[in-house]
Image: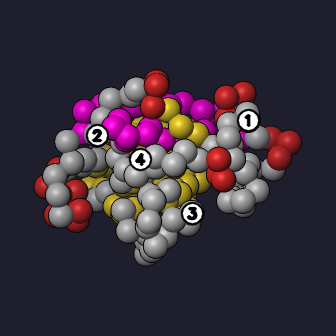
Amino acid sequence: MVSIQGVHLFEDKVYHDTRGHFIESYQAARIQATLGQAIDFVQDNLAFSNYGAIRGLHMQLPPYAQAKLVYCIQGKIIDVAIDVRKGSPTFGKSFTVELSEENRFQLFVTKGFLHGYSVISETALVGYKCDDFYNKESECGINPLDCTLNIDWKVPSDKQLISEKDQIAISFHELPEIIL
């Protein structure tokens, strides 16, 4: 289903009974078996957003680049990963998927990808695990509305909520040369 090396889609197993349901949301052995390597996640983040919020497109530059495991706890989002690994055959290509509390998909995005999402439900609670700590000096982001990428965020332009930082971010063509 995923056509870009370095991006993997996982589906949580949900166990239902009369009390409700139970989900094993993270299992290191399952991730390692799929990826062929262990990932040492060191930080968990949660973001609550309203309809129309577009967060991204962000990444951290080396040596603080991060791999992420992204999931939607409540609501529904359009999640986007863009390959910016220098020399990659899929450089500049994007992968888009809907993550929701209903489908229970998780998206693993390796180092060297820009990442972002839009909220297409009334609200959304998004979680993501990172394999390196946040480092402000290594932040890199491009404008999520960059016409080169032509991303359909599934939010009408008059309803889009984008931070000032993301609105004035660089274009895709201005990405630093030190990308992975």
Residue 119 placement (x, y as % from top left): 63, 44
Mark closer to the chain start, 1 or 2: 2
Magenta region, residue range: 41-65
Is disc 3 placed on a helix, strand or loop?
A: loop
Q: Is residue 95 magenta?
A: no
Residue in the image at 30% along x and 35% along y: 132
**Residue 23 horizontal/vertical position (percent):** 28, 49
First in sequence: mark 4 or mark 2?
4
Task: Answer with mark 3 or mark 2, whichever residue precedes in sequence.
Answer: 3
Residue 70, label in figure: 4
For label 4, the SS is: strand
Query: Could you tell me the amino acid type at mark 2?
Result: Asp
Q: Which residue is painted at 76% across and 40% down in the image?
A: 160
The front one of 79 and 137 is 137
Image coordinates of residue 153 in percent, x first then y, are 69, 53
Mark 3 Cα shell of 10 Å, populated few (<14), some (14-19), many (≥20)? some
| Circles 3, 2 touching at the beta carbon (< 8 Å) | no
As displayed, is residue 106 above or below residue 68?
below
